[in-house]
Image (cartoon, rainbow, N blue to C red):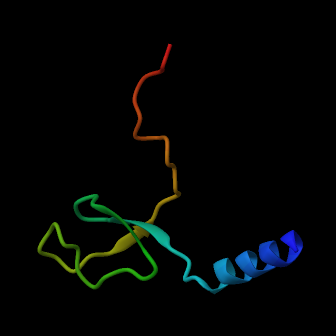
């Protein structure tokens, strides 16, 4: 029964749209979306979006020593 539940979960995940980590090339504003917007919400220009790798722990500074 567990194998069936795992397979169903994997199928559901496969149906979800992939999200992209994007950054505005003009101002550096970062977003995570399935598709890039036409304009950056932070600067008045039509944005050129740059794909950035997802790094969930990079914003954290220092160590926990």
Q: Quadrant of residue 45?
A: bottom left
User: Residue lying furthest left in this view?
Assistant: 44
Give how far across and how far down residue 58 sits, in percent.
46, 41
Give how far across and how far down residue 16 sits, in percent.
58, 82
User: Residue lying furthest top in this view?
Assistant: 65
Q: State left or right for residue 61 relative to residue 10.
A: left
42 relative to 58, above or below: below
Looking at the image, which is closer to me, 35 or 50? 35
User: Residue lying furthest front in this view?
Assistant: 1
Question: Residue placed at 49% from the left, 41% from the top?
Answer: 57
Question: Residue placed at 65% from the left, 77% from the top?
Answer: 13
Q: State left or right for residue 53 relative to residue 23.
A: right
Give how far across and how far down residue 17 sits, in percent.
55, 83
Q: Quadrant of residue 31?
A: bottom left
Question: Residue placed at 85% from the left, 78% from the top?
Answer: 4
50 relative to 8, above or below: above
Tag count: 0
Looking at the image, which is closer to me, 31 or 49? 31
- The quadrant of the image that shows the N terminus is bottom right
Question: Residue placed at 88% from the left, 72% from the top?
Answer: 3
């Amino acid at each position: 029964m567990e194998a069936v539940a795992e397979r169903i979960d994997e199928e559901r995940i496969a149906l979800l749209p992939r999200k992209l980590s994007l950054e505005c090339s003009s101002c550096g504003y970062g977003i995570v979306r399935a598709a890039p917007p036409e304009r950056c919400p932070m600067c008045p220009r039509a944005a050129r979006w740059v794909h950035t790798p997802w790094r969930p722990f990079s914003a954290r500074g220092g160590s926990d020593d």
